[in-house]
Image: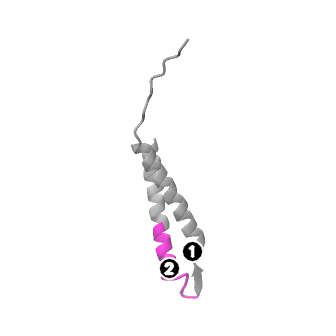
Amino acid sequence: MSGQRLEMKKERLKRYYDAEEKILRGQSYKIGTRELTRADLESVQDKIKELEAEVDALEKHGTSKRRSARVVPLG
């Protein structure tokens, strides 16, 4: 399940990177008589940071070695 979540997060992060690139190329543009304005750059970059942290956490969680210790009760 975490592998699927990781892939979904990576895909979403890729879409945010694409959105950031489009915003950087031009915040607003015209098509004929219509003017379109892209999303706020700051909010997109904040979401990128959040998703990067989530992806890092999921990747670390999946590769961590598990340790177990044997406990012998005294008494």
Numbered circle sitting on residue 3: none
Look at the image and say whether residue 26 sits in the magenta stretch.
yes
Residue 17 visible in the shown view: yes
Residue 39 visible in the shown view: no
- Which is more toward the observer, 13 or 63? 63
Q: Quadrant of residue 70?
A: top left
Question: What residue do we see at 46% from left, 48% from top?
Answer: 58
Looking at marks 2 and 1 on the same chain, the residue that comes earlier in the sequence is marked by 2
- Which is more toward the observer, 36 or 66? 66
**Position of residue 4 measured from the top left corner of the image (x, y, whole percent):** 44, 46
Look at the image and say whether residue 75 sits in the magenta stretch.
no
**Position of residue 71 measured from the top left corner of the image (x, y, whole percent):** 48, 21
- Which is more toward the observer, 66 or 38? 66
Kind of residue indicated by mark 2: Leu
Q: Quadrant of residue 41?
A: bottom right
Q: Are marks 2 and 1 in contact (CB under 8 Å)?
A: yes
Element type at mark 1: helix
**Position of residue 75 measured from the top left corner of the image (x, y, whole percent):** 56, 11
| Residue picked out by circle 1 | 41
| Residue picked out by circle 2 | 24
Q: Height in image: 56 above or below 63?
A: below
Residue at far front of view: 75
Please provide the residue range marked out in magenta: 17-33
Question: What residue do we see at 58% from left, 80% from top?
Answer: 36
Color style of the picture: one colour
Question: What residue do we see at 52% from left, 16% from top?
Answer: 73
**Position of residue 61 measured from the top left corner of the image (x, y, whole percent):** 45, 44
Q: Height in image: 26 above or below 60?
A: below
